[in-house]
Every structure is written in structure tokens, then in C-alpha cells.
Amino acid sequence: MRHLAAKAWYFFYFGSRSFIHPYLNLYFRRLGLNERAVGVLAGVKPWVSGPSRYLWATFADKHRKHKLVLIGTLVVSVVCKTLIGASHAYWLLMVLVFIGEFFGAPNGTIADAAVLASCKQWLVWKATSVGCGRLGINSFTMGALISRFGIEAPFVGFPIFSIFAIIAGFTLDMSLLTSPDDAQQGEEKKLSPDGLSDQNVPLLVESMDNSGMQDMHASASDAENIGEDALDGGKGSSKGRSNNSENAVACSAKNGGDGNAGFFSKLRKVLSDPEVIIFLSMTFLMGIASGAIESFLFLYLDQLGAPEYLMGLALLVTCSAEVPVFALMDRILRYVGVQTMLHIVMGVFILRLLGYVMLAALPSTWWVLAIEPLHGVTFGCAWGAGTEFSRRIAPPGLDATLQAIFSGMYFGIGYGTGAVVGGALFNEFGPRIMYACVAMAVAVGWGMCLIAIRVLHGFRA
């Protein structure tokens, strides 16, 4: 039943979003707004959703009101986003976008936390649902409908699909998030040594340096190394795993496992770890790249004369690339490791951005279909590795909060920066220069993160 509820939620939730979100900026442009104005509207959404996602998730965690927050915020966001289709004034669009994102931001975060806590093989279920909902119904079909009926077509399908998403939200199992015993259950899950998706890698594993594996000691300093250990991927000998399980229990008792540590004290301890800071910095860079790509790709194709059905077909290819990645994500992360996967994502983001730079020089806009499969890595692997890292470092009772921080940095602050800065560059210099500048910024930022990791590991050695 839990699996069925999760499948229904992701099918209808992402299905409804695929009706409207990919075409919003194209709608704004068809209203006569320039790329700078479109970039501001696109940037407002994630900048609002980032803090909102954190605030709502923190409220839900502290007051154990996860389902109330999920359903209430979803209803308000659906109403506001539907009204965008009947609005033309810039100030009214800004208000509706602001309110819609403020209430819509926590929907996916809280649902993800519930599914993570209650479902086995959750990535497989999500892959099936997202694949069917997003690519089977709403990608190519919506592009074709826009070509036939106009840019207002998405605002008809969105509220209909959203009604079913609201119903599906009621069926999600929130018991492990709202039960008084959820902290103990969450700790037991994190300490199980087998698997990634349901039996979860130990929260505290061996600390790595260039000389090899070293045992950890049950002290306060161990808890401060959570980020390094989570990025390490959980690899090591069975003896090391056994020792670490015992040490993790001891650390948990000292650092909040017994409920004595305050909510914000536990959160502050996790976020102060240098490895976690580096992870969030890389997440920010991914968000910048994603914001520039998703906010302006359809405007770029429109400028090149591509029809709307090609845009829909491009979205179909984009979403199709997610399915095998999500289906195999637990195996991929177990084989590759979280840290390595994050670096692979950074490299593929740069490759994808450079592909868009070259698109205008190619003989046909249909070549975009050769670039879009990279989305399977830049979104699928980034999301999988990021949520897995966030889950590992989350103390009991902060599951939704840590997921919100990751989502807020990627889909909020980073995405918004990419949208606003990308819009200004697009408006002044055109899309090719814009994508080239974003690729360069991501490459430089990634290089700085690599240097920081090297220096940090040398310092700790």
C-alpha cells in the first residue's frame, strides 16, 4: 500500500508540474516580456522556494504536521499557478509567482522525506511513476497541444492533474515522520550496514585519507566529521563497519540520539562541517547550471525557429533519460560512490552547457535531441546522490529539514541565480554567450571545490 501511494503521488505530482512548468517562461515571453524580465520571474520562483522549503519543512518536523503542511500548501500553490494563465500584468504575474512558489516549494520535499522513511526501493517506484507521468502524457503531448491550441493550453491540464495529486497526497504514509518513536526508528535505519535505499549505509563510517582507512573513536569530534564520512560512500572492511556501528551509537547518544540536543543545535553541528559546506557549494553550482538551462532552453529554441512540438519532444527525451538512472540509482551509488557521482555530474553539466553553445552552429535545431539525454546525469544522478547524502547526515527528526536544505540550495538559491544572471546575459549578449559564461563559471567553481577538498583532506591527514 505504501508503494502504491508513493507511485500515485509521483505520477500525478510530477505529471501536473510537467503541464505547466516547462512552458511558463515561454508563456511570459509570448506576453511580450524580454529575457531580462523573464529571468527575474524565473529567478523569483527558486529564491522564494529555497527559504520557503526550509521554513515549511522545519515547521513540519518540529510540530509533526507533515500531512497538513503538504496538503495545505499544495492546494494554495495550485490555485495561484492556475491563475497565472489568466494574468497579463507584470506585477500580478510577480505576485502569483511569489505566492505560488512560497506554498508550492515544500510539496516535493515533505513527500520525499515520507517515502524515504517508509518505502523500500523508493527510487525504483519514483522512476516508474515520474517516467509514466512526465514523459508518457505531458511532454510531447503538451508541446503538440500548444502548437494546436496556443500557449494557454497548459493551464487547463494543470489543475485537473493537480486534483489527483492532492488526493494521492492524502494516502502517503507519514507515520515514521510523525510518530513519537520516529527518532529511534530513524537511528536504527541509519545504522544498518546493508544497502543504500532501504537498509541504508551507516551514518558514521571510516574516515579516509591518502594513507588508507583509519578507525573512528566515539568522541564529539567524530560527529563533526559527518559530512566527510557521508561523502566517502561507506566503503571499507567489515571490521571497520562493525566498529563504526558501535561508534555511531555512542556518537548519537552524545549528539542528540537521546533527544537531549536541541533541534537547531543538531542542525548547526551538521551544517558546520567543512565537507558539508563543500557539498552545498557544489549543489549551488549545479543549481546555477540547471537554472540557466531550464529557464531559457525553450526561449533559445523559439529564437532559432523551432516549433513547439519539437520543444515537447525535447522534454520527452529529457524525461526519458531519467527513468533508467532512477531505476538503477541504488546500484550506481553503491558502485560509484556518492562523492564520485557528484563530480561526474559537474563534468556532465559543463559538457551539456557547451552543447547548447554549439547548437546554433549545427544545421538543424533537432540536434537538441542529442544533447537532452545528458539530463539523466545532470538531474537524475545529481538528485539521487544529493538526497542520499542529505539522508545520511540527517540526525533523527531532521530528515525533511536536511532534504529541504539540499533542495533549496539546488532548486532555490542556485537555480534562481542561474535564471536571473542567465536572463541578463541572454538579453545583452544572446543565448550562446550566456551558456558559455555559465559553463565557465561552473568549471571555475568546481575547480575551487576540488582544491578545497584536497586541502581539507591534507589538513585532516
Image (cartoon, rainbow, N blue to C red):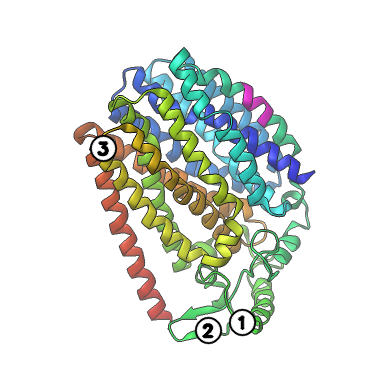
Label 2 vs label 3, nearer the camera: 3
Q: Secondary structure at mark 2?
A: strand
Quadrant assignment, res 70: top right
Coordinates of residue 281 in the picture (x, y in percent): 40, 57
Give the residue type that dot 2 points to: Met
Label 2 vs label 1, nearer the camera: 1
Q: Earlier in the sequence, mark 2 or mark 1?
A: 2
Circle 2/circle 1 CB separation < 8 Å? yes
In the rendered view, does 103 fall on the left or right side of 188? Answer: left
- Circle number at residue 237: 1
Determine whether 362 is above or below 248 in the image. above
Name the residue beneath numbered marker 2: 213
Q: Quadrant of the C terminus?
A: bottom left
Residue 268 seen in render: yes
User: In the rendered structure, does residue 407 fall within the stretch colored magenta?
Assistant: no
Q: Secondary structure at mark 1?
A: loop
- Circle number at residue 362: 3
Q: Secondary structure at mark 3?
A: loop
As measured in the structure, the alpha-carbon distance from the residue carrying label 2 to the one carrying label 3 is 50 Å
Give the residue type that dot 3 points to: Leu
Q: Identify the magenta region.
A: 160-165
Coordinates of residue 83 in the picture (x, y in percent): 52, 18
Label 3 vs label 1, nearer the camera: 3
Q: Quadrant of the N terminus?
A: top right
In the rendered view, does 216 fall on the left or right side of 450? Answer: right
Q: Earlier in the sequence, mark 3 or mark 1?
A: 1
